[in-house]
Image: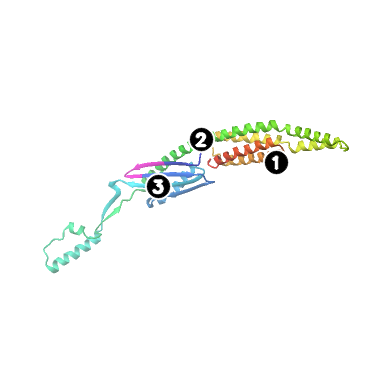
Amino acid sequence: MVHSMTGYGKGEADKDGLSATVEIRSVNHRYADISVKLPRSFLAFENLIRKQVGQALNRGKIDVFVNYELTAEVQAVPVLNRDLAGAYHQLLTGLQQEFDLKVPVTVEYLASQKDVVQVREAEIDEDVLRECLVEAVSAALAQHIGMRQVEGEETRKDMAERLDAAELLLEQIEKRAPMVPLEWQEKLTERLARLQQGIEWDPQRVAQEIALFSDRCDISEEIARFKSHLIQFRELFDDQEPVGRRMDFLLQELNREVNTIGSKANDAELTRHVVALKSEFEKVREQVQNVE
């Protein structure tokens, strides 16, 4: 199955007052390049995320973004600084006694002093963080892979059409190829016939030249290898493993055969077909660059 390397997925998970959101975006890349952007509370889980994403996505420039929110109940908690409150109380009661003040030192007054009561971010259990994060990443990956599959199917259809067009061009090349040495032999015979008056030429030597020309422009081996590579390429459409690198290799081999056919062509019609083949394979190459 052909998977694109371009995709986007978003996943969310809620647990014990924690809401985690994970976004995964990717574009084509030669290898798996995973970048993870985390808030401070999740830094300990960076390797866990890399491993989880790396097991699901084999190639691509992959960016993972993690955000979270806390419910109002757990966003922050007040904390009493008892030592500081005691120091304020001792100071204020000392002033009362020294200046004979009758105003009592109340709890409300002590609590209003700077830093006696502090609001701190709630600490979330590490297991809750991990479970919530793994769940959100899994949801984002599922959506992301689904998008890769949809785009990959469109890519497969386009490549299949290109290969069908290439196969038709190859059939035309295969039909035309045997005619090239025959036409060359006819032209050579005509030229010799026009020049034979007063010129002696060796028929055996001419036959040798015709044989050599036929051998030089014989493309039967290239056509056989071309057909074999096409079959292998099409088989990759149904492979369950990542196929991008193998497609790229086979495409190089197909282009190699086309170039050899072009160099042996010695015929304007064959050359036109070769140019058309190269055009189709260039479009396939552009698609293969985004196949996982």
Q: Are marks 1 and 2 in contact (CB under 8 Å)?
A: no
**Left or right of residue 241: residue 92:** left
- Say which residue appears at 67% left-offset and 38% top-offset: 271
| Distance of label 3 from label 1 (alpha carbons) | 55 Å
| Distance of label 1 from label 2 (alpha carbons) | 34 Å
**Circle 1: element type:** helix
- Label 2 packing within 10 angstroms: few (<14), some (14-19), many (20+): some
Earlier residue among tags 3 and 2: 3
**Residue 66's disc number:** 3
Q: Nearer the viewer, mark 1 or mark 2?
A: 1
Let me know if residue 238 is in the magenta part.
Answer: no
| Distance of label 3 from label 2 (alpha carbons) | 30 Å
- According to the picture, the residue beneath numbered tag 2 turns out to be 154
Q: Which quadrant of the structure image shows residue 207?
A: top right
Q: Nearer the viewer, residue 105 or 28?
A: 28
Q: Label 2 is placed on what type of residue? A: Glu
Q: Which residues make up the magenta segment?
A: 10-19
Vertical comparison of 198 with 114: above or below: above
Q: Label 1 is placed on what type of residue? A: Ser
- Label 1 packing within 10 angstroms: few (<14), some (14-19), many (20+): some
Image x and y of residue 186, in percent: 78, 32
Q: Which quadrant of the structure image shows residue 118?
A: bottom left
- Say which residue appears at 55% left-offset and 41% top-offset: 286
**Residue 263's disc number:** 1
